[in-house]
Amino acid sequence: KTALIDAIVNPNGAVTFGYEPVLITAKGERVYSGFLLSEGEAVVIKDLAGERHTIRAEDILKKSVMNTSLMPDPLTLGLDEQELADVAAYLREWR
């Protein structure tokens, strides 16, 4: 329970390997963010909506791994203590 609440309150505390967000700027000023799925002649990332984006490697102008989680913290979401407790309780029951 404590670890779950800590992960919600401090989402940048420990980003799990493989879930580091990637930010890609491609030709045409297109910007993509999400989780890296594959890399090679094309880069495939999955955004927060679950949509996959395939970007040709030659079209990538900049790619960087972000050191912060994509999950917003409770203050950004406007959650009070009770709402935070409710979210934690829901997640503990959901499997």
Image (spheres, rainbow, N blue to C red):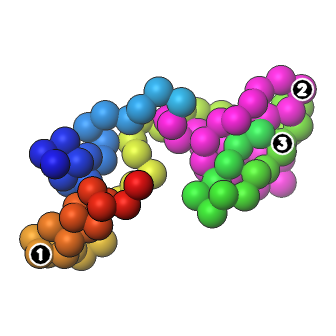
User: Residue at label 3?
Assistant: 55
Amino acid type assigned to the residue bearing label 1 in the image = Gln
Sequence-wise first label, 2 or 1? 2
- Looking at the rendered structure, the number of numbered marks drawn on it comes to 3
Sequence-wise first label, 3 or 1? 3
Q: Is residue 92 left or right of residue 81?
A: right
Q: Is residue 62 magenta?
A: no
Sequence-wise first label, 2 or 3? 2
Report the magenta stretch's main SS. strand
Task: Report the mark closest to the observer, 2 or 1.
Answer: 1
Q: Is residue 73 visible?
A: no
In the image, what residue occupies the spot 39% across and 42% down? Answer: 68
User: Residue at label 1?
Assistant: 82
Q: Position of residue 90 (x, y in %)?
A: 29, 67
User: Residue at label 2?
Assistant: 41
Graded by Cα atoms within 10 Å as few (under 14), some (14 to 19) or many (20 or more), the crowding at tag 1 reads few
Q: Position of residue 20 (x, y in %)?
A: 50, 35
Q: Secondary structure at mark 1?
A: helix
Graded by Cα atoms within 10 Å as few (under 14), some (14 to 19) or many (20 or more), the crowding at tag 2 reads few
In terms of depth relative to the viewer, which is nearer, 77 or 5? 5
> Which part of the image, by quadrant, shows the C terminus?
bottom left
Q: Is residue 31 magenta?
A: yes
Q: Secondary structure at mark 3?
A: strand
Amino acid type assigned to the residue bearing label 2 in the image = Glu
- Give the spatial CA distance, label 2 vs label 1: 48 Å
Q: Is residue 68 left or right of residue 92?
A: right
Amino acid type assigned to the residue bearing label 3 in the image = Ile
